[in-house]
Amino acid sequence: MQPSFLNTPFGEVAFRKYGAGGRLLIAFHGFSADGAIFRAMGGYLDGGCTLYAIDLPFHGNTQWRADDYRPGQLAAVVRLILAQEGKGRFEAIGHSLGARLWLHLLPFFKGQATCLYLLAPDGLQTRWLYLVEWLPVWWRRLFIHFAQRPAWILALARRLHRLGWVDDFLLRYLNHHLGEAPLRYRLLHTWMAIGHFRLGTKKVAHLIRQARVPVYVLLGDEDRLVKPESIRRRLDGLDEVSIEEISATHRSICRAAAPYVKNRKV
């Protein structure tokens, strides 16, 4: 399916629309993916649901004009979808990084977002990409400037790897995402945006309790990026949250979650 576009003040936001049913769902994908990751889910839900899967800024076919993005801008995109569908209420789906983004959007949609599905919510963990979220904006901008020539970063990462200070995952991650200009641009500008979506443990609890909507968390038993025990600790004690572990990897969970979303079995 070729994407369609929403015209916004911030750029052209690509989206894929699956189905034409009465339940409206709006999905955010994770880092390095795009809205097509929800294609199988869209096919499964077809009939009773309408699923919008957008391409986040710096991903897929979205043409974003700024060098970062903020919760209010994503909320404006969601409002355009609601207006386009003539709907006042919807269900939200966030995969990986998309989970973090949706948590920050909940305050914008009190009484409109009826529930939130978090699929393999890597955005709740403190992986290396999110450790930098507290750095000042000027520092991040300076780093982006110097990272346009990433050879020194990769050389440093290899040396730190030999010393045991950088693990295999991070070394592969940096080599892949900094090696080519388009991938480097996506990584660095997503990193710029992360500072607007900070998530300490208390912040997570505050956002969920304030929203007063059920939050359904699905974790994959074959996910090598998200550790179920870490997520359970982060969300422990929140009555609004239900957690289930299913047979899935970090990416395939977007397909495996379809029956749970359709039937709300979580």
Image (cartoon, rainbow, N blue to C red):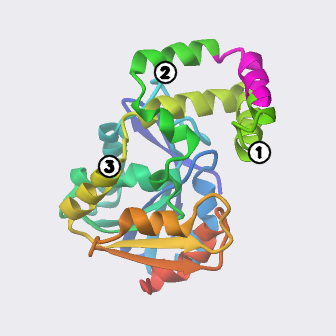
- Where are the magenta residues, as a range? 147-159
* N-term mark: 2 or 3: 3
Q: Position of residue 24 (x, y in %)?
A: 38, 68
Q: How far apart are marks 3 and 1 (CA)?
A: 31 Å
Quadrant in which the C terminus is drawn = bottom left
Indicate the amino acid at tag 3.
His
- Out of 116 and 42, give the one closest to the viewer: 116
Q: Is residue 220 left or right of residue 83?
A: right
Which disc, if any, is residue 9? none
Indicate the amino acid at tag 2.
Arg
Q: Position of residue 79 (x, y in %)?
A: 30, 49
**Height in image: 139 above or below 226?**
above
Disc 3 is placed on an element classified as: helix
Which disc, if any, is residue 104? 3
Q: What residue is at 35 percent from the left and 48 percent from the top? A: 200
Indicate the amino acid at tag 1.
Asp
Give the residue number, with chain letter if any, for mark 2.
140
Which disc, if any, is residue 168? 1
Q: Position of residue 213 (x, y in %)?
A: 25, 70
Residue 124: quarter of image: bottom left
